[in-house]
Amino acid sequence: MPVPDRARSAVAHAAADDPFAAARPRLIALAYRMLGSMGDAEDVVQETFIRWHGADRAAIRTPAAWLTTACTRLCIDRLRKAKAERAAYVGTWLPEPVALEPPDDEALGESLSMAFLVMLERLSPSERAAYLLHEVFEQDYAAIASALGRSEPACRQLVSRARKNLGVPESAARRKARFAADAAHAAELAGAFVAAAHAGDTARLTAMLAEDAELWSDGGGKALAALNVIRGADRVARFFVGIRDKQDPELTLQFRPVNGRPGVVGHVGARADFALALEPGEGGRIAAVYIVRNPDKLARLAPQ
């Protein structure tokens, strides 16, 4: 039954006046970068909504800050539990891939990449939260202290330690994106890589890869994948040539951005078989390849 224009307008107006609805996209972005799982991020944001619904709204002076604090603390609790699970993970752990174009905001786009999310795994939950809030979401230390329930000097130390663990200079206010490309160039890069792999052209693949390129592959013990990171252009190229005859004959490919980077999603029927993201590096060569094959992480990547 069609919705009358007046009703649609009322719904849109109500959403605009709802602080949670206004904050939800930002909360999802924060929670995904904290947890590396869109499913977990949505669960945390839903729990944030439940807490918001039961809160004394009259006592909340700044709803956006309250929501960020609630979401951040829930993420920290969940990440602490996830750390033990990831330590026992079969093979290499990678984040759940999302088929998203890079946001216009440079920091948000860079922080969406597989490379950045994998790097964040070096941090403690509190360091991760402080670093993301300050460097990516541009929160000042007073806001971070409120969100984490710590003093401002303690939060400055958390961000400083995070920068040190990540190899980011203290003077860098934000990480600088190493690569920016339009959708056409991204698809061209992914297409050229897949074509070389399909042709078994080891020389061409090696030429496309940085000398110290890495291949990260996540099967979670549920799908075939390399158990360890493969390093070196020649070894990565030979890996792709070696698996080309082992693909399901019904496999179809869709060139889609994966975590804001040039990517490919393979499907067998309606089931996603893998998601591949390319991390471009210096000189137009590929610095890293990330492949997710764990079926638990691919449910959202249905064919388009």
Image (spheres, rainbow, N blue to C red):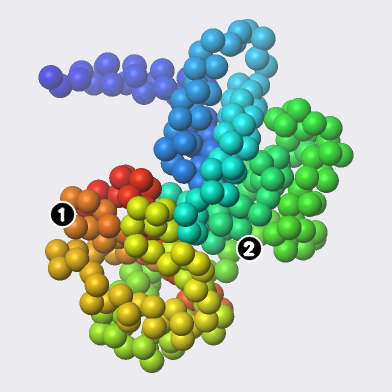
- Which image quarter: residue 153? top right
Alpha-carbon span between mark 1 and mark 2: 39 Å
Task: Tell me the mark number nearer the camera, choosing from 1 and 2.
Answer: 1
The disc at residue 176 is 2
Q: Nearer the viewer, residue 4 or 301?
A: 301
At x 32%, y 88%, the residue is: 201
Asked which secondary structure carries label 2, the reply is: loop
Q: Residue, x 77% and y 63% (percent of image)?
A: 169
In the rendered structure, the answer to whether residue 201 lies left or right of residue 71 reads: left
Could you tell me residue 34's position as x and y percent?
A: 57, 43
Asked if 71 appears above or below 119 in the picture, the reply is above
Residue at the image position 53 percent from the left and 34 percent from the top:
27
Residue 41 picture location, percent across and down: 48, 36
Residue, far right: 153
- Looking at the rendering, in which quadrant would you find the N terminus? top left
Residue that carries the numbered disc 1 in the rendered image: 269
Return the disc, 1 or 2, that comes first in the chain's sequence: 2
Question: Type of residue at label 2?
Answer: Lys
In this rendering, would 267 be left or right of 107? left
The secondary element bearing badge 1 is classed as: loop
Please give the name of the residue rendered at 61% of the width and 25% of the height, measured from the top-left corner. 70
Residue neighbourhood size for the residue with mark 2, other residues' Cα within 10 Å, grouped as few (<14), some (14–19), many (≥20): few
